[in-house]
Every structure is written in C-alpha cells, then in structure tokens.
Image (spheres, helix red, strand yellow):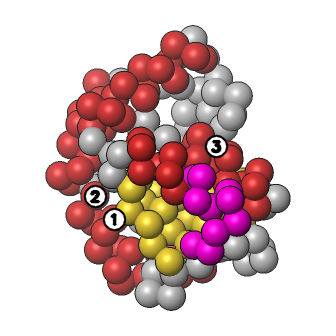
Amino acid sequence: MRLALIGCGGSGKTFLSKQLAQHMNAPLTHLDAVYYDDEWNTLDKDKFAAIQEELVRAPSWVIEGNYAGTLPIRLRAADTVIFLDIPPAVCLWGIAQRRLRHGGGQNDATGVYDRITWNFIKYVWGYRKTMAPRVRELIKEHAAGATVHTVTSRRQARALLAHLTAGQPV
C-alpha cells in the first residue's frame, strides 16, 4: 500500500499515520521533519520535491503532510489517500493537547519541534475555507487511480483506522 495522508495541523495526521504505517509494516515519512530542520529553517523547494519523488518510488509507504505545492507527487503515486477534513476547533484542540504532551519541545513522533505562532493558528482556523478546497481539487486532478477517504470527524478517523487495521479492503 502507498498511502498519502493529508490534513490540517492538529487533525490527527501523525497519530493515524503512525498506526497505519505500523500495521502495514511500511516506512513512515513526516514531511515536516523533511522540510524543516530543528531551527525551523526550510529545505529548498526543488530538493524537497526531489526527496518526495524518491520516497514515492518505494513499493510501500505512508507519507503524511500537506504541502500543496508537492502534493501531486504523492497523489499520483498513492493507491490510498486519506484527507482529514476536520473542523478547525477540533484541530486547535488537537494542537493544544500536542503542546501539553510535548511541552512545546521536540515531538518524539516526528522529530519536529512544536512551534505555534499566531499565523499558524489563523492558518488552522481558516484551513477548511482556504486550503481544503485546493486539496480536494488536487485529489480530484491527481489521485484518479487511488481509493480516497475523506474523514470529517475524530469518530470517522477511528472507524477508518479500525476498518483498515482489521484487514478490510480499502
């Protein structure tokens, strides 16, 4: 399985991707850990795309992250796409919980340092209006051969996880 997981910050991408990668026995890539170093410096855009081109050549993988500019790379190669289209208040609650869990330091699951800014909060709050339509359009355009799951609640995410890990077909 080649699984692309997309969603707003705080939507549960890290949790879900970790569970699915473990179940699939597939390598897991957190794109934030690729794109940012520990001082929040960003990777060159072309190098970031090249790394993803290499990652999607593997026979099995789970890649989680947004990055709409390179999303077509993942969508064209994925056989399964999960889009976590979770309400902003739920995402902000998820971010607050993550912040409490990791104390604002390095997230052990991803290797990325937790950094919450006012711009990030505004991005999360507006994600469904600004980013989600673009993600849906990119999925429609580039993931024609993939099974697509759009999840709009934590309950749906848990049900999908249970379904996929129970050996049910996607």
| Earlier-in-chain disc, 3 versus 1 | 3
Identified by mark 1, the residue type is Val
Rendered image: mark on residue 33:
3
Rendered image: mark on residue 89:
none
Residue range corresponding to the magenta coloring: 161-170
Identified by mark 3, the residue type is Ala
Q: Secondary structure at mark 3?
A: helix
> Residue 133 location in percent, x, y?
23, 63
Rendered image: mark on residue 135:
1
Residues at discs 2 and 3 in contact (Cβ within 8 Å): no
Q: Residue 92 occupies which quadrant of the picture?
A: top left
> Residue 39 location in percent, x, y?
60, 28
Closer to viewer: mark 3 or mark 1:
1
- Image quadrant for the C terminus? bottom right
At x 57% / y 11%, what residue is drawn? 103
Residues at discs 1 and 2 in contact (Cβ within 8 Å): yes
Instruction: Kindly tell me whether residue 55 is visible in this rendering.
Output: no
> Residue 153 location in percent, x, y?
35, 46
Give me the C-alpha separation between circle 1 and circle 2.
Answer: 5 Å
Q: Residue 1 occupies which quadrant of the picture?
A: bottom right
Q: Residue 78 occupies which quadrant of the picture?
A: bottom right
Label 2 belongs to which residue?
132
Within-10-Å neighbours for mark 2: few <14, some 14–19, many 20+ = some
Give me the C-alpha separation between circle 2 and circle 3.
Answer: 22 Å
